[in-house]
Amino acid sequence: MSNLQAFMIEEKEEIFEYVASKRFKDDNGKPMTWKLKSINAKENDQLKKECYKQVLVSNGNKKAYQQQLDTIKYLELLVDKCVVFPDLHSAELLDFYNEMNSIDLLKKHLLNAAEYDDLVAEVQKINGYDLVEASEEAKN
């Protein structure tokens, strides 16, 4: 096998199982397993493009607008894109909770604050983000 052939691999979607909450149980009383997927770099770029906002910054006497990534919105969109099951866009599920937005459904009805934060961390992990390394960088 040549070195170049090492890069010639078939793409296949990998599904990760994750228990996001112990409150939702299957017929046997076990916590329901959620299904998550990772996204590719191009999909990630698209999400980020939706999340930039203009922020007014001042540097001495000068004021200027600067683009800044809205991290909260980005993480919401990332989670929304990566959760495969339950289908957060299901009309039946949205109607049941009287919601029109999948992110509101997730944050207001399906998960409590800690469960949501854990899900966000898991989604980042399956997409290759090293959260320990990121927190160490933030400390420095």
Image (spheres, rainbow, N blue to C red):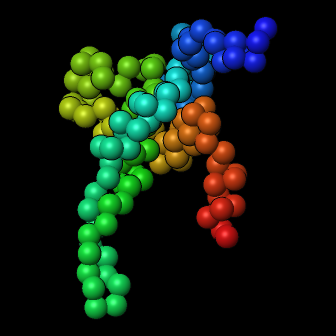
In the rendered image, residue 18, in percent from the top left (x then y), is placed at: 60, 26
Quadrant in which residue 29 is drawn: top right
Residue drawn where x is 25% and y is 34% of the image: 101
Against 17, residue 121 (above or below) is below
Residue drawn where x is 38% and y is 44% of the image: 48
Q: Residue furthest right?
A: 1
The answer to whether residue 110 of the structure is visible from this angle is no
The N terminus - image quarter: top right
Against 71, residue 125 (above or below) is above
In the rendered image, residue 20, in percent from the top left (x then y), is placed at: 55, 32
The C terminus - image quarter: bottom right
The answer to whether residue 64 of the structure is visible from this angle is yes
Residue drawn where x is 26% and y is 69% of the image: 65
Residue drawn where x is 57% and y is 34% of the image: 127
Q: Which residue lies furthest to the bottom in this view?
A: 61
Name the foreground residue: 126 vs 120.
126
Against 90, residue 127 (above or below) is below
